[in-house]
Amino acid sequence: MHRARRPDTAVWAAMLLGSVASLVASLVLSVDALRLAEDPHAALSCDFNAVISCGTVATSWQASVLGFPNAFLGLMTEPAVVVLAVAGLSGVRLPRSMMCAAQVVYTVGLGFAYWLFHQAMFSIGALCPWCLLVTVATTSVWFEMTRINIRQDNLFLPRGLQSALSTAVRLGVDVVVLVAWLLLLVLAVVLRYGDALFAPAAVQG
C-alpha cells in the first residue's frame, strides 16, 4: 500500500457517508426483524399507511431470501466498505486486486438491492423507507467506488475502454448519470403509487 492522490478525498468521503447510511439502515431493519420474530403483529415506527409499510415488506418472503433477514447482509458487508473508505481518506492506495474484487462484490450487492426494490414495487406492493435508504445509499456507494476504480485504473479494463471511462469521469458524466438515475427512482415510485404514498393509515374498527 502507498499514499493515494488527494483529489480522491471527496470521493472517499462520499463513499464513507453512503456506507454509514446503509449500515445504519441495516441496523434499524435488523432490530425490526427481531421485533417481528417475537411478535409478527408488532407495529413498526415506519408503518405509515398501506404503501409506506416496513412491516408489510419485512414479513414478505423476499425479506429473508437466504433464510435470515436480508438486513443482516448489510451488517456483514457495509463495515468492510467503511474500512475501505477510511483507508482511502487516510491517503492509503489500496491494492488493485482488492479494489477490483470489492467492485465485483458490491456490484452483486447492487443488483440484489434493485431486485428487492423491484419486488417491493411490483410484487409486495409496499415500500419501506429504510429499504429505500439502503437502495439509494448502495447506488451512491457503487458510483463512488466505480469512480475511484476508474481514476486509479483498478478494473483491468481494455485500454480503449479505460481511456474512455477516465475521460467521462474527468468530465463529470458519472455525476450526471447518478443524479439522473436517482431522479428516475423517485419518479418511478411516484408514478407507481401516486397519492397513495400520502394516504392516511386505515383506522382499525
Image (cartoon, helix red, strand yellow):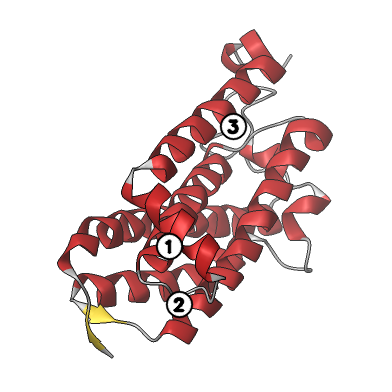
Residue in the foreground of this view, choosing between 8 and 86: 8
Q: Position of residue 199 (x, y in %)?
A: 61, 11
Q: Residue, x 43% and y 45% (percent of image)?
A: 174
Task: Give me the C-alpha separation between circle 2 and circle 3.
Answer: 38 Å
Disc ID at residue 99: 2
Disc number placed over residue 47 in the picture, else none: 3
Q: Is residue 168 left or right of residue 72?
A: left
How crowded pointer 2 is (Cα within 10 Å; few <14, some 14-19, many 20+) is rated as many
Q: Residue furthest front?
A: 160
Q: Are marks 2 and 3 in contact (CB under 8 Å)?
A: no
Residue 15 vertical placement versus 57 (above, below): below
| Residue 23 visible in image | no
Of the numbered discs 1 and 3, the one sitting upstream in the chain is 3
Residue 187, image quadrant: top right
The residue that mark 1 highlights is 145
User: Which quarter of the picture shows residue 112?
Assistant: bottom right
Q: Amino acid at mark 1?
A: Met
Q: Quadrant of residue 158?
A: bottom right
> How many numbered circles does the render carry?
3
Could you tell me the amino acid type at mark 2?
A: Met
Q: Which residue is at a point 67% across and 40% down the rendered structure image?
A: 55
- Residue 185 x, y percent position in the rendering: 58, 31
First-in-chain label (2 vs 3): 3
Q: Amino acid at mark 3?
A: Asp
Depth check: give the residue in front, 152 or 24: 152
Residue closest to the eye, 101 or 129:
101
Query: Residue 25: x, y in percent?
Result: 47, 52
Quadrant showing the N terminus: bottom left
